Image (cartoon, rainbow, N blue to C red):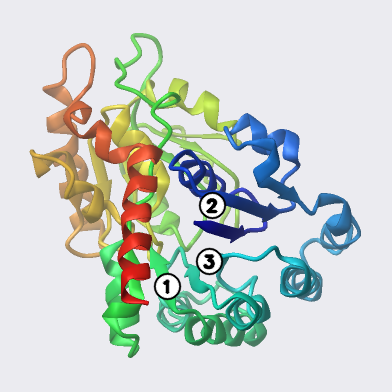
């Protein structure tokens, strides 16, 4: 099967390209990821169609303008235009939502290809509704909202990773038959069962951007009246990190170094207001940390892989009270873990990228039979 995959950054689409390639498909991965870097993630050289040199002027404008809306629109236009006119013939065209639109039409018209839109979060209108309830969060430019909505309509299918995302599309009138649900994988060569560090450790760790979207304002409110210790690893987005004695911040680190930080914590937490399926949860799960999450992180989908569901605790409500009871429950579980923390070993074959690619391949086979 000839499969074109159109991305911008690496995202999970490079992992998808590699896995489909390993399954024998003729894959072309279009992005501005340098081919040398794509090779480091296991993609064959002949499968990497790097547009880096073409995109350099546009990427420069994004940097100079500090990611101004107009510069991001230019990036989308340039990538989409290139694929519209120059993509190789394919049977399946998989494209990143919002970035690609006209190329979906082109792939269908030129090659009669099956078109799949990759979408990571809730339906854009539901996402904006949730974010509109947070006074300090800047709303998405109408251009990106309309472009996303157009992509939903143009694509034959929409690939998503979690059930709460699926429900947000169904509630907005998208047919369930158009949705392909498949939880993302995790690189188990980087993340594996850990022992809690005997040196300085923390009660709780969070990995990811420090933002309102990820519910970090709730964490600030909680920890200002708590004696528990907290470690954050990631970038500061739209919320200041507090100067509390029990809260520590570490800037973003290379993914390969994250294991060392998971070793330092008893439990993992993610209280996002809306997210598709946060892959850091899979990392924490693979490292053996009990997880506390909201219903909007995709944690429930990961819990579905576990025989013993107790290790992933979902907040019933986005409140300090529910957060407190969930954290206490997770810490009690953590106290029962001696030595290597390995409650996920029996599901590792479902969590890795190979399993993700296998599920995606089966979905493609079903789709082709229907078409």
At 42% from the left edge and 77% from the top edge, which residue is drawn? 123
Question: Which structural element holds mark 1?
Answer: strand
Residue 293, image x and y in percent? 28, 51
Which label lies toward us, 2 or 3? 3
Q: Nearer the viewer, residue 147 or 181?
A: 181
At 34% from the left edge and 73% from the top edge, which residue is drawn? 179
Q: How busy is the neighbourhood of tag 1: few (under 14 within 10 Å), some, or many (20 plus)?
A: many
Chain-order first, disc 2 or disc 3: 2
Residue occupied by mark 1: 158
Q: Nearer the viewer, residue 225 or 113?
A: 113
Residue 55, image x and y in percent? 84, 58
Chain-order first, disc 2 or disc 1: 2
Residue 87, image x and y in percent? 71, 65
Q: How busy is the neighbourhood of tag 3: few (under 14 within 10 Å), some, or many (20 plus)?
A: some
Q: Is residue 181 visible?
A: yes
Q: Nearer the viewer, residue 65 or 278?
A: 278
Question: Which structural element holds mark 2?
Answer: helix
Asked if the residue at tag 1 contacts the one at tag 2, i.e. Cβ–Cβ closer than 8 Å, the answer is: no
Residue occupied by mark 2: 13
Residue occupied by mark 3: 91
Compared to residue 204, the image places residue 101 above or below, namely below
Q: CA distance from mark 2 to mark 1?
A: 14 Å
- Taking the view exactly as shown, the residue that stands out farthest to the right is 57
Classify residue 144 as left or right of residue 184: right
Compared to residue 298, the image places residue 164 above or below, namely below
Q: CA distance from mark 3 to mark 1?
A: 16 Å
Q: Is residue 224 visible?
A: no
Question: Which structural element holds mark 3?
Answer: loop
- Which quarter shows the C terminus? bottom left
């Amino acid at each position: 099967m000839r499969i074109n995959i159109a991305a911008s950054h690496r995202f999970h689409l490079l992992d998808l390209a590699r896995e489909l390639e390993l399954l024998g498909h003729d894959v072309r991965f279009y992005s501005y990821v340098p081919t040398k870097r794509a090779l480091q993630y296991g993609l064959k050289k002949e499968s990497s169609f790097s547009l880096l040199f073409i995109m350099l002027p546009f990427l420069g404008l994004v940097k100079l303008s500090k990611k101004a809306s107009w510069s991001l629109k230019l990036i989308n236009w340039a990538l989409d235009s290139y694929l519209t006119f120059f993509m190789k013939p394919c049977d399946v065209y998989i494209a990143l939502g919002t970035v690609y639109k006209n190329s979906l039409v082109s792939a269908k018209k030129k090659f009669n290809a099956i078109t799949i839109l990759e979408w990571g979060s809730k339906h854009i209108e539901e996402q904006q509704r949730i974010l509109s309830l947070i006074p300090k969060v800047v709303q998405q430019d109408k251009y990106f909202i309309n472009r996303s909505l157009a992509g939903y309509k143009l694509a034959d299918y929409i690939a998503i990773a979690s059930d709460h995302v699926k429900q947000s599309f169904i509630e907005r009138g998208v047919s369930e038959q158009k949705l392909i649900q498949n939880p993302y994988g995790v690189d188990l060569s980087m993340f594996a069962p850990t022992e809690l560090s005997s040196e300085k450790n923390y009660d709780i760790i969070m990995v990811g951007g420090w933002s309102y979207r990820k519910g970090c304002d709730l964490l600030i409110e909680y920890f200002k009246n708590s004696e528990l210790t907290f470690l954050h690893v990631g970038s500061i987005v739209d919320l200041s990190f507090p100067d509390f004695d029990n809260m520590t911040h570490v800037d973003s680190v290379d993914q390969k170094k994250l294991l060392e930080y998971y070793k330092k914590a008893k439990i993992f937490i993610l209280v996002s207001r809306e997210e598709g399926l946060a892959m850091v949860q899979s990392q924490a799960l693979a490292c053996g940390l009990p997880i506390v999450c909201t219903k909007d992180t995709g944690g429930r989908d990961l819990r579905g892989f576990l025989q013993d569901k107790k290790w992933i605790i979902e907040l019933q409500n986005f409140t300090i009270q529910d957060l407190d009871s969930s954290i206490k429950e997770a810490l009690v579980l953590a106290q029962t873990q001696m030595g290597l923390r390995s409650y996920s070993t029996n599901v590792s074959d479902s969590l890795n990228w190979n399993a993700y690619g296998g599920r995606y391949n089966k979905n493609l086979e079903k789709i082709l039979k229907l078409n």
